[in-house]
Amino acid sequence: MASGDFFSNAERLAIDTTIRRSEQLCRFEFSVYVGDINGASRPFATRLHNTLVAPARSILILVDPTARILEVVTGAQVRRKVTDSEIELTVAAMQSQFAEGQLAEGVKQGIERIAEHAHTQA
């Protein structure tokens, strides 16, 4: 779910395509929230993650471009395959793309990297 007025239609389509490919690769579910958050970022992201259909098998990427906030929440099954350090490296790579004004590319890169780490550990 690439949302908000932050992406063009082509960018939304590219993110959705990246999500589908990544889900097929690693067998986990990805959700993306881009927009303003309400309150502290981590609890907000965790609440969103908990509303997903299969939170244990899901990854939520939350980006608030205005406040420059990025959170990644992973479910229990995902954490067995993807380490905290791999998530930290992914976040750093995404932040680098965001700093260059490449929001959509950063989101796509983050999804792809997490899927690769999860697939490699399978």
Image (cartoon, helix red, strand yellow):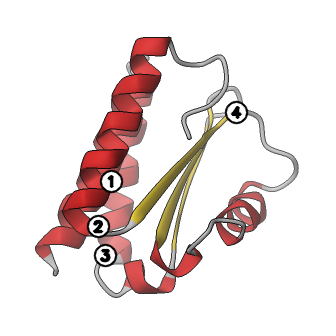
Q: Which residue is mark 4?
A: 35
| Alpha carbon separation for disc pair 1 and 2 | 6 Å
Identify the residue at the far right of this view.
Answer: 39
| Alpha carbon separation for disc pair 1 and 3 | 11 Å
- Residue at position x 12%, y 72% in the image: 120
Identify the residue at the far left of this view.
Answer: 120
Crowding at dot 1, Cα within 10 Å, few <14 / some 14-19 / many 20+, comes out as many
Left or right: where does residue 3 sit relative to residue 20?
A: right
The answer to the question of whether label 3 and label 2 lie on touching residues, with beta carbons closer than 8 A, is yes
| Alpha carbon separation for disc pair 3 and 4 | 26 Å
- Residue at position x 25%, y 47% in the image: 21
- Residue at position x 16%, y 81% in the image: 122
Residue type indicated by callout 2: Glu
Up/down of 114 relative to 80, above or below: above
The answer to the question of whether label 2 and label 4 lie on touching residues, with beta carbons closer than 8 A, is no
Q: Which residue is mark 3?
A: 82
Q: Position of residue 98 (x, y in %)?
A: 44, 28
Instruction: Give the secondary structure at mark 2.
Output: helix
Q: Which residue is mark 1?
A: 90
Instruction: Give the secondary structure at mark 4.
Output: loop
Residue type indicated by callout 1: Thr
Up/down of 61 relative to 118, above or below: above
Up/down of 40 relative to 51, above or below: above
Depth check, mark 1 against mark 3: the one in front is 3
Left or right: where does residue 66 sit relative to residue 28?
A: right
| Alpha carbon separation for disc pair 4 and 1 | 20 Å
Circle number at residue 86: 2
| Alpha carbon separation for disc pair 2 and 4 | 24 Å
| Alpha carbon separation for disc pair 3 and 2 | 6 Å
Instruction: Give the secondary structure at mark 1.
Output: helix
- The quadrant of the image that shows the N terminus is top right
> Which is nearer the N-term, disc 1 or disc 3?
3
